[in-house]
Image (spheres, rainbow, N blue to C red):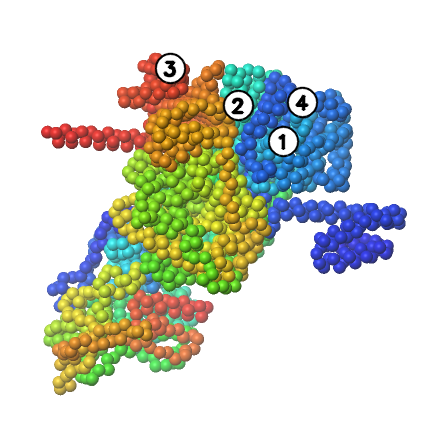
Amino acid sequence: MSSINSLLKNNLYLFHFPHFYTLFFSISSGLKENHSVYFQFVINRFCFLVNGYYCPFLRKLHPCVCVIMSEYYYFCIQNERIKKNNMAKCNSKGLYQSEYEHDACGVGMVVNIHGGKSHQLVDDALQVLENMRHRGAEIGKDGDGAGIMLQIPHEFILLQGIPVPEKGKYGTGLVFLPKDKNRQQEILSIIIEEVEREGLQLMHLRAVPTNPDCLGERALSTEPDIKQLFITGVQDDEVELFPRVLYRIRKKIEKRVSDKDFYICSLSNSNIVYKGMLSSMQVREYFPDLSNPYFTSGLALVHSRFSTNTFPTWSLAQPFRLLAHNGEINTIRGNRGWMKARESVLSSDALGDIREISPIVQPDMSDSASLDNVLELFLMSGLSLPHAMAVLVPESFNDKNPISEDLKAFYEYHSILMEPWDGPAALLFSDGRFAGGMLDRNGLRPARYTITKNDTMVVASEVGVMDFDPTEVVEKGRLQPGKILLIDTKEGKIYYDGEIKQQLASEHPYRQWLSTNRIQLEKLKSGRKVENGVSNLLEKELMFGYGQEDVTSTIVPMATTGQEPTAAMGNDTPLAVLSTQPQVFFNYFRQQFAQVTNPAIDSIRESLVMSLTEYIGRVGTGILNPDETNCKMVRLPHPILNNTQLDILCNIRYKGFNTVKLPMTFTTDLRTSLDQLCKDAEHSVDQGFNYIILTDKEVDGPFIPSLLAVSAVHHYLISVGKRVQTALIVESGEIRETMHAALLLGYGASALCPYMVFAILDDLVKKGKIQEDYATAETNYINAVKKGLFKIMAKMGISTIRSYRGAKIFESIGLSESLLRNYFGTEVSTIGGIGLEKIAADAQSFYAKANSLKESVTDSFLPNLGQFHWRKDGIRHAWNPETIATLQLACRKGDYAKFKEFSKLVDDKADPIFIRDFLGIKQQPISIDEVEPVSEIVKHFVTGAMSFGALSIEAHEAICLAMNRLGARSNTGEGGEDSARFHTEVDGVSLSSKTKQIASGRFGVTTEYLVNAEELQIKVAQGAKPGEGGQLPGFKVNEIIARTRHSIPGISLISPPPHHDIYSIEDLAQLIFDLKNVNPTAAISVKLVSESGVGTIAAGVAKAKADLIVISGAEGGTGASPASSMRFAGISPEIGLSETQQTLVRNGLRSQVRLQVDGQIKTGRDVVLMALLGADEFGFGTTALIVLGCVMMRKCNMNTCPMGVATQDPRLREHFLGKADHLVNYFTFLAQEVREYLAQMGYRSLNEIIGHTELIETKESVLDLARLLYKEEGVLHHTTDMPRHFEGLLDQQIIKAAQSAIDCHEEVNLDYAIKNTDRAVGAMVSGVIAKKYGEAALPDNTINVKFKGSAGQSFGAFLVHGVSFKLEGETNDYFAKGLSGGRIAILPPSRSEFSAEDNIIAGNTGLYGATSGELYVNGKVGERFGVRNSGAIAVIEGAGDHCCEYMTNGRVVVLGDTGRNFAAGMSGGVAYVWDRRGSFDYYCNMDMVEINLVEETQYRRELHELIRQHYLYTGSKLARTMLDDWSHYVEQFIQVVPIEYKRVLQEEQMRKLQQKIADVQRDY
Amino acid sequence: MKNPKAFMEVARQEAGYRPIHDRIHDFGEVEQTLNTKDRRQQASRCMDCGVPFCHWACPLGNKAPEWNEALYNGDWELAYHLLNSTNPFPEFTGRICPALCEKACVINLFNHEPTTNRENECAITEGAFREGYITIHHPIRNGKKVAVIGAGPAGLAAANELNLMGYEVTVYEKNEAAGGLLRYGIPNFKLNKTIIDRRINVLEQEGITFKYGTAIDSIDSIKADAIVIATGTPTARDLKAPGRELKGVHFALELLAQQNRVLAGMEFSPEERITAKGKDVLVIGGGDTGSDCIGTAHRQGALSVTQIEIMPRPVDGPEDPKNPWPNFPRTFKTTSSHEEGCTRRWNINTLEFIGKDGKLTGVRVQEIDWKPNPDGGRPIMVEKGEPEIIKAELVLLAMGFLKPEHPAYPENVFVCGDSLNGASLVVRAMASGKQAAQKVNAYLK
């Protein structure tokens, strides 16, 4: 509004005309009130003036008036638009941020290999799209977006009467335009201007016919005007360059027009994209063009989107200009950041001045769109399609990957220039001539292809999306991790990966380029003597804020074991911003991690994709032009430098490498010092320094926290376009933990040297306090940091440090918005917080402390700050002696008064610890008698997921009994539950936990387990260590735990970091669907951990049809976890809960899901506040354990819990003091207290207050809680259950047909055709049987079902004993998941002509988490077969990567090749591999297994029998051949036995032998 | 912890007392010591709790987990510095502290074999003196003066703290030597006075001035920037029963102080001398002071010793339902003195001191019972049975002390210890003294 004022002032002559006086008055009076309304009025009035009666008159008198006023008008519209855009971008009031959005999807491609065009192909592609409907998301009629990319249909265009020149000589594409006609005109004039500037013409503008009737509400409300552009005028000799011209035109237009509803779908002379905010079913209907029989194409690429939000986004539909992507680019923040930084040095001969077309990455688009942008740039600069893809999404090339040295050099050369765009990605791409597909290095997204005799190739996320006659099929395969498949439709040729890559690798002498230019740091030697110690160690330690625990609990374990230390029982200390003590600046940050929308990587077992290799130096300007000078860099094997290496780097006098050290000192004013540092850095770049070393080593006086310094310099250099010309290295005494290293790297440092750690190690070694010598200690420490970095990266699904560096995969808690904006390149702060003044004060206070040491006379030592272990004078802990003892006493004695003492201690503590400590409740009392009873309130309470295995049986059962007695729910945790407990009662109360958890390890997840539950909880992440797996060490696995977990006593049980059947949101939807089939009455819950962005994920989860969403606070956490994760991953439940509530309400999803929260909830006040923030249910973990006797020993990982809570040691379990009664007392007290609060507030039930943040009052603090307490309007709590759709399931037919079998064990034989849309077939029937008969299920071969066709995902999931499936055809991912005794045989259709053993007929992750049963596959299977198999037997004829990962029992026979990383993490069971090439040992991960020939008779017999069965069930030709010549083939088999398992087997044998001896002796 | 299972594998081992026959004839310390190896084994039993209740229970906030670990690792010097960082005089508490920490030990919660913190503390400190780890500090003087009145544990703690902060400290003590009740209350068989002398020597070397035999009647007479009053609880609770004036009825401290002075070489005339030799002794009051009287009486050669207490017999341990873990249990306790022989009776009210020729011959007592008060206040005493006479030639009144009252002092005066809180433990007095020192520092800074 102020701008209008100035406009008015500057144009006073306006008011000479009397009519404008009224206008002016209306403006000026309006300004005081509602601006926008008055402004609107003014505008209307003006329009009236201009268009109406006065118009001609006006024009005549004051022509300039019109111009000015129309500028007004435009200005106003613009202003509103910007405002709206900003609103949508940051929604400045709440916690939701659009950048958190994720999407995943289904992709497909149909190509005629010879480029033959037909309408049939278009039609087929749409069919493919429609067959992947379940992979997209729909709410009502609204889809999340779908589209199709085709070749330009030349004939069709001509038939529309558009006189285009010949093929390829005109550019066309669909454009989304605003509905507003005026704006449309303006945009069109810009387009015309830009087209003409390139010497071309906008020849025609076609209104694309659409059918909006089919659209849903949200899509309709934002539907753009869709026009088709035709650009002509290209000279014949410039046709070659035409695509680039069109690209430049488009980029320039995009640069000038930033309207949200403006978007150019594509602009090309070869292909065209039709898309919109549609569901996959709507594409055909919405665009009648596509149904026109003259609309032909030789290739088509389709995509349907599943987004985590429901906001209308037409432009985000895929395909983009070149590609369609299923998955998520995890590294996107880094990629975008570096792309921006790089723009300043990019130059392309082909494209001219890059600045004209920047930004390369279009703002406010999705990760996939950004990837498409960069791919396009590369292509336009002259790279070939496969070359560009290989650079952007390289395969892993460390020594565990079997690729040629030349290719490795190719990758290494390019890795210097471009960090990988990493993430689960199935990418399909086409430039109109070439069409292809590839997977990222992890291969986490499925992509299967079929090639037919009539030269059609279909690639899609699933098989079965198109029907083929079996005799038509030539080849069935899958895209493999990091591999490309390409079709040249012009040549009619298929290029497989090997051929493509060899061509790429031989294009330039990359190996030679590298060896002559790139320096390897580890190969440099120096004669200089470098001192590791520092003088005045203690003083320095105090200056950098060290405490005793930093040394004893962090540095020493790292230096002695080479591992990160473990801690237990969560983090109950204050957030840095709330702490009363000075803070190390790192403490304000938290790691972010992947949940649901992309998987964490398993950095330990799947290390073959991980890399810490760094290149430092000046990035040349010619990265688009291949040249050996580009690789003039120093290669670091990892970014942690020791003193010697840093010294070498500082002193390289070689080929123009030079270094400058900038001290991170600050004088009185931190701001000035920072500015100066940034300027100095810039100056250094100008002077040509390759490395800037930011150091605090020689700093005398307070120093700038290293993270602040690095981030400030990094962002400043980007802003002045000088970032990539130099590398930032940090030499700081602050660095001691992995998190510190991760933060510095994540905010832009290339390498770092933690010299204080080295000094401390030096001191420890010299004083003999550790046994290691210095070199070993240093190596161990660095190794521990490396492992930690791997883990932190992997948590986010990032595999290389190069993609992680500068990616800012963190969030800050408690830093002010201005600080973040100025120095951290972040716009929004969730809860506000401190600024530079406080940081400066803390630094000064550390310095003062160190200084006071000089004056102190007493003998000094490093104080214990009480970070992990409570100290009276240390950091506050929520659980301290008073709270623990009082709570235990109150519950043991059933003393409510004592309980009130406890809640007073918790609620009225002197210093705040949690955000909730700043919240109060508004009061308006009513009589407590009006409030709902305790018995209703306790139903809102649940206990946390704590497994039997982590807990003792006594503790686990006490919790279960208490909750069942209250009518509330207890949670099994991830360790399963002894099936005896399902039907056991104690005093009439069931011992079966109502909530059964399904975690990544799938321990004990049998069909019987699933059907005996009221709630099935999918644990996506865990508060104390989100994004990480877990391990139950072998010594804790006793008989009963082994039985419960379906494993073997004494064998370690490892949970992988990700669920191997959830790599994306649509996978989660699939798992939810599976579980709903098995147990249709159970609610499905999904457990997430609080982080910024969790709301958006929760929205996706709700769309995946979960009934209950758990937001787990990072503060909670029972049991053991890595210390750094416990403290630095995840955030407060308040923030996560509030964001989730806001996002769900905003999306209209809140009413159909329940929301549960946990994380240090202790008292009635906590419960009420969490309810006000939006929770329906409340979880209690630590509190429940404390009631049962836990005294927070924090020794859960050591099996020495003295209170018998978290131990399996029978001697210690005797100490268990807890009783179910105590817990019943606790929850009753708690509910009573909640009642009292409700009465004080004037509400009758808990449901009435859920989400009513207006009832919260805030206390004065440095925090800004407005975002947290923002209330979205809408339904605020759970009102209706998620609708369940079970119509038309194949299982319903099977159940009906097999009723007699289910009821009276009569054998039935059934026959069905099956399609890829028939998912989780067998799950529901298995559930019905397990419910009835338990684990035993039915007698062998009672229900025999034969299927023909392509089965959908999760075929035969949870199939129980007595049910046999035979599938003739093929199947998609997750077949035989959770197999519980059933038998599955999969074989190619009988008439097919391809050789079974060479073709893929089953997808990824088969047999995941199977506990028993049999599976026979007459063909190859995809990646990760048999992950976490704990008892099933399987025979397959070839497998992808990571086969038998984490297997703990059972048998797997592979009659063919395996992929890389066979048997990673395998701790039990036996695998047999037919090693016909003699190369198996390369593919096997030998960390935990031994391989040998099959020599013992017993094993030979076993193998023979397994193959015989395979033959019996599948008729495999290969099996027949082998059986016929057994003595020959058996010699070629390799047996894989885990070392641990071998020991157990030997012990078993020994026991048997001893038994035999004993028997013999007895008989005498 | 290097052996996380030590608490399961190593049993609690107390050094124990010298045999009764050996100890009863002298005033040497009754407690024995463990050898170094066993001591370190004992230290290993500490579980290094996530929430160390011992540390919480200790008024000084001693960090048992930290120095136990150092002790176990054999780093005696570090152990002492860690210990000394919270506890100025661990050699005192190591001998006479009732060890609130041990009662709050988590091991005490489940099997009543807590770590031997008190003994470990003592061993660490003795080790430190022996090995010369205790060095003389020379604080930089800040030019400000503080006077401390009273050289008991509170006064000494305050003086020490202030001295190390750089204040010039003068301690005024009415008695002839420092230590307060440490010196004049606690018998030598529990705390040898050379232990006190050793520490005072250190304090003097570090620059504290002690003025003995200087009773301060008015603080106006003192010239200092701040004054710390640590004068304890000089008034013992009296028993106003008929015959109180009889010869042979004494306050416990009269006996204890005199005995300690005798052992320090002072001489008393036979009239002044209070001795149990050849007497039947009755101790009235069942607390620790009573126990000290019993032990002293035995060593003086009493014929018999009886101890009566008006309150009921405490519950038998180890658990006290009214003060559950981690609180200090008020359970039935048998001290080393009790072991040496004593008749103990509870619920006994004293009616009258009976004497002949002005000399005590016996005490008439009445067995009583306590009925709950319907108004919820103190229970009501009711008589039970007939009064009886206990033969005694010496009665020692060990019934506690009266909490002193203070006038309104100027703002530079700080009261601490028993003088502030009433009679309590040495460890509490020391903690209070340290707090007073912090307040002084805050005031003078």
Q: Are marks 3 and 1 in contact (CB under 8 Å)?
A: no
> Which residue is located at x 59 percent, y 24 percent?
A124
Q: Earlier in the sequence, mark 2 or mark 1?
A: 1
Task: For label 3, count other residues whose C-alpha is less than 10 Å away and answer few (under 14), some (14-19) or many (20+).
Answer: some
Residue kind at label 4, given as amino acid type: Pro
Foreground mark, 2 or 1, reads 1
Q: Secondary structure at mark 4?
A: loop
Q: Earlier in the sequence, mark 3 or mark 4?
A: 4
Q: Quadrant of residue B51?
A: bottom left
Which chain letter goes with mark 3?
A
The residue where tag 4 is placed is: A293
Left/right of residue A214 with respect to residue A589 in the rendered view: right
Left/right of residue A282 with respect to residue A1540 in the rendered view: right
The residue where tag 1 is placed is: A283
Which chain letter goes with mark 4?
A
Which chain letter goes with mark 2?
A
- What numbered label is drawn on residue A449? 2
Residues behind callouts 2 and 3 on a single chain: yes
> Which residue is located at x 20 percent, y 75 percent?
B368
The foreground one among B217 and A1534 is A1534
Q: Earlier in the sequence, mark 3 or mark 1?
A: 1
Q: Secondary structure at mark 2?
A: strand
> Which residue is located at x 54 percent, y 58 percent?
A1255
Foreground mark, 3 or 1, reads 1
The residue where tag 3 is placed is: A1520
Residue kind at label 3, given as amino acid type: Arg
Residue kind at label 1, given as amino acid type: Val
Residues behind callouts 2 and 1 on a single chain: yes
